[in-house]
Amino acid sequence: MPESRRTHELPTALLTDPQMIDACRVRDFARIFRLVKTRAGIYPSMIARRCELTPSRVGEVIAGRRQLLHMDVIERIADGLRIPGHMLGLTRREWETPTVLAVVERQPTGPGHPPTELRPLAALPGVGVDSILALAAGTNPSPSTLHALRSSIEDYWRRDDEHGGETLRPAVVGQLRYVEGLLKDRRPPPIQHGLYGIAAELARLTGWTYFDARQYHQARAYFSEALQLAKEISDRPFMANVLACMSLQATYQDKPADALALVSAAQDQARAVSGTTARVRAMLAMREAFAHAALGDRRATHTAISEAHSQFERIRPGDPDPPWVSYFDEPKLIVDTGIAHGRLGEAAIAEPLIADALQREDPANQRGRAFHAFWLAQTQLQRGNLDHACHTATEALVPAAAVTSERVSGHLREFYDQLAPHREVPAAVAFEARLREVLPVPGQRTPSSMRT
């Protein structure tokens, strides 16, 4: 991400803070500017420069002596402070829109190639049969349309696990825009509610594909969109799920305090409804453990791990779990427990847990196998078992080569960096040779902080 875009971002914890959300909703720029100053360290002079306002005008707004009502000024503030458009009642800003949305393929014209209409993004290669069936339903969606769209999302997630989300993203974004188009018309409440839920899940999936590619700015924009869509139907468990995704992203951005704030907000959403299942609560407790581990808080991490296991033990057959949490099964609980211990440097506890979960990992989940093999190698290296660690990391390269995921590549390059003191050892030499065949080895060291 370019430096200018990175520095313009507001902290995730601020953009998801109820005070900020409310201030944006009513366009109370005095409150917005004060929050931006105290929470993001962007002082009035900087606000003025970014938003093309005079410092005196900003000062008057903060003092309550002036209001900002003109749309062009509001748009400049959204763009200057990188406040997502929907928070201020604006359309999606240009900087929020992925470049893929601006790309339109044209069919060749001329003899043998009559002019054709531009293809909608939802019909780009990679879209599933269920998606095509949904599109064929036109603009009068029925319960069967919703079922087709949900089946399509399940297929997207499966292929994301197996191959990564890079090639899926154009189809997913196209389908998201298609569903949002359907939401412009009034529908019977069950259909309208279902469409909002589907749009929220498609936005979360799009955010996830950008997160997996380590394109964090775009990921956050889509996670925020998913949050807003879920809020429209008061789907608090799903809002908790999105906030948990944002918490995990914050750990990758080395923002552990934001990670903890976001997962705490997720748990607040889950507690606000009585129907939140034990599996959802277990997943959220484990995300809390990750945040505490990133902060190095051993006691709080252990407490959160215990809570995750306690909640998991309460799961009963027939529980009305939402589909998006079905991935959080016993092997996932075990491997996440191991990763949390590993982040604390408790390798002796972590290694057998991760090894056990890796043995039970679905062979089709290439990214999961690569991740978990990396973490096993990481704990083996912490324990001084260099040969075992290099062998395990070499095995991780097999599923890594089958999936397009910058997160996977980044983890394995981190491991390569950590081998620097042992580069002459035969096992390390063999791993490096294989790594160079599968992934380009960067000239610079990547951050060696342990991530999940």
Image (cartoon, grey):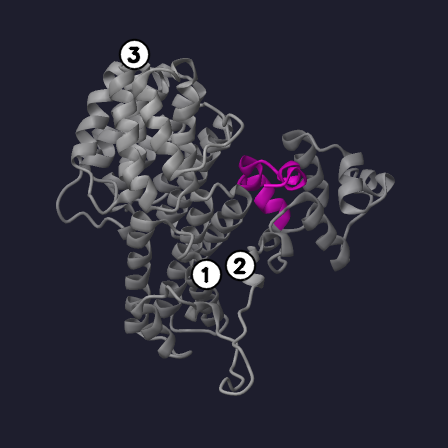
Q: Amino acid at mark 3?
A: Gly
Q: Which mark is residue 100?
A: 2
Task: Residue 173: give x, y in percent of width and height.
Answer: 46, 60
Q: Which mark is residue 384?
A: 3
Q: Residue at x 42, y 17 (%)?
A: 296
Task: Residue 23: give x, y in percent of width and height.
Answer: 63, 45
- Of tags 2 and 3, the one toward the viewer is 3
Task: Residue 48: give x, y in percent of width and height.
Answer: 80, 41
**What is the CA distance from the residue labelled 2 to the residue labelled 3?**
45 Å
Dot 3, how many residues are within 10 Å of its Cα: few (below 14), some (14-19), or many (20+)?
A: few
Labelled pair 1, 2 in contact (Cβ < 8 Å): yes
Q: Nearer the viewer, residue 121 or 403?
A: 403
Q: Residue at x 56, y 85 (%)?
A: 110
Q: For the view shown, which residue lies furthest in the left direction?
A: 317
Q: Is residue 328 above or below residue 288?
A: below
Q: Amino acid at mark 2?
A: Val
Q: Is residue 20 magenta?
A: yes
Please name the residue that numbered disc 1 is placed on. Answer: 170
Q: Is residue 269 above or below residue 391?
A: below
Question: Dividing the image into 4 quarters, which one contains the C terminus?
Answer: top left
Looking at marks 2 and 3 on the same chain, the residue that comes earlier in the sequence is marked by 2
- Residue 297's quadrant in the figure? top left
Q: Nearer the viewer, residue 326 or 105?
A: 105
Q: Secondary structure at mark 3?
A: loop
Q: Nearer the viewer, residue 413 or 200?
A: 413
Q: Which residues are magenta?
A: 1-24
- Of tags 3 and 1, the one toward the viewer is 3
Looking at marks 3 and 1 on the same chain, the residue that comes earlier in the sequence is marked by 1
Q: Amino acid at mark 1?
A: Pro
Does residue 337 show up?
no
